[in-house]
Image: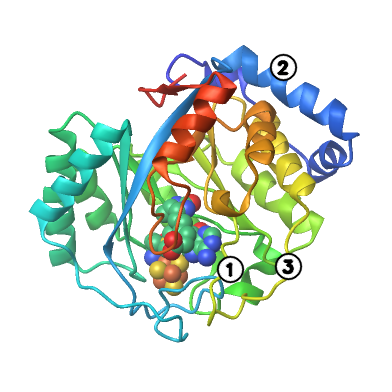
Amino acid sequence: MSATPESVLRHDWQLAEVEALFALPFNDLLFKAHSIHRQFFDANEVQVSSLLSIKTGSCSEDCGYCPQSARYDSDLKPEALMPVEAVIEAAEQAKQQGASRFCMGAAWRSPKDRDIERVVEMVQGVKALGMETCVTLGMLTEKQTQALKDGGLDYYNHNLDTSEDYYSEIITTRSYQDRLDTLERVRDAGINVCCGGIVGMGESETDRSKLLLQLATMPKHPESVPINMLVQVEGTPLHGREALDPIVFVRTIAVARILMPASRVRLSAGRREMSDEMQALCFFAGANSIFYGDKLLTTDNPMTHHDQQLFQRLGIHMGGSSYA
Ligand code: SAM
Ligand code: DTB
Ligand code: SF4
């Protein structure tokens, strides 16, 4: 992103324009998205991030998709915040596999100040390996955000998940505005923003358009935009939702690429349920980042050797830097 002047990026997208993109014939949409992708990025390069759940389960929130909520019976074993050394060891392994960024996720509504101290030690240890760092810890205060920035954190992940209209159908224990407030704090502190959402939760086409519109009309586009396909976990309220048409998923990636041309669009959760061919279409449509490693936070991801083979078959190379 650093090489792209803000002036070439639009922040004034209108809902009708986004809906018109979604409605384009598939080939026209993909051609447009791919052409834009090539103007901003090496079309054969994909950035890879690995995930680790540093604190698992027992979360007080009621996010309807999430196996880590204490309210649902998802068969998950809760685990306290990990020791720093174990986290660094996991990061080392991810680096050996080829990951350039290490993302640490905690099942918190919001962290306590003493948690932040330990997370900062993790960030420093992972950075010392030469990897980029990302954490996702829930809502932050200004003081906590500053502590993370001072500790050298590169990215903060905080997803909007869906449109403001649909949000209360999925989560009732916090508001859309709470999310926006944390995102603003992160941006103001000078930490790169990783923000996206989940599709396949039963939302409408307009909800998907509104989510992307919300992201693309932020004063600065998020540097990373994860597009997750709902991973359906037994015991969660969203288990059993009708699966999203894969073509609509590819369209969502393409529209994200067009609206936010200089951002990394991440083909995130849900790849295990996708065919190789569908993933190839997503890369053509503008996805240029993935979560890599056998596990997401608590659910399975494709095996690394499978992803390596897929990249080889597609002539894709793993990118080191997250910037264009
Ligand atoms: N507790 C923090 C929070 O919610 O911001 C950080 C961890 S939370 C697990 C990180 C993100 O994972 C969520 O915002 C959501 O977008 C995504 N996520 C969780 N469960 C998912 C699922 N079953 N399928 C797809 N994405 C999911
Ligand atoms: C994001 O957008 N997706 C990741 C990461 N950011 C933190 C999490 C996906 C979680 C999928 C369900 C699980 O494994 O628990
Ligand atoms: Fe908790 Fe985050 Fe899961 Fe929501 S998404 S239940 S806040 S871990």
Asked if the residue at tag 2 contacts the one at tag 1, i.e. Cβ–Cβ closer than 8 Å, the answer is no
Residue 128 in picture, x, y percent from top left: 12, 33
Q: Which residue is mark 3?
A: 202
Q: Secondary structure at mark 1?
A: loop
Q: According to the image, label 1 marks what residue?
A: 232
Pair 1/3: label in front? 1
Q: Is the distance from the Cβ of mark 1 to the nearest ligand 1 atom less than 8 Å? A: yes
Which mark is on residue 35?
Answer: 2
The residue lying at 72 percent from left, 53 percent from top is 208
- In the image, what residue occupies the spot 34% across and 68% down? 107
Asked if residue 41 lies left or right of residue 35, the reply is: left
The alpha-carbon separation of the residues under discs 1 and 2 comes to: 33 Å
Q: Amino acid at mark 2?
A: Ser
State whether residue 97 appears in this view.
yes
For the residue carrying disc 1, how many other residues have a C-alpha within 10 Å: few (<14), some (14-19), or many (20+)?
Answer: many
Q: Reply above or below: 312 against 55.
A: above
Residue 32 located left or right of residue 302: right
The location of residue 314, given as percent across then percent down, is: 58, 23
Left or right, 96 with reference to 20: left
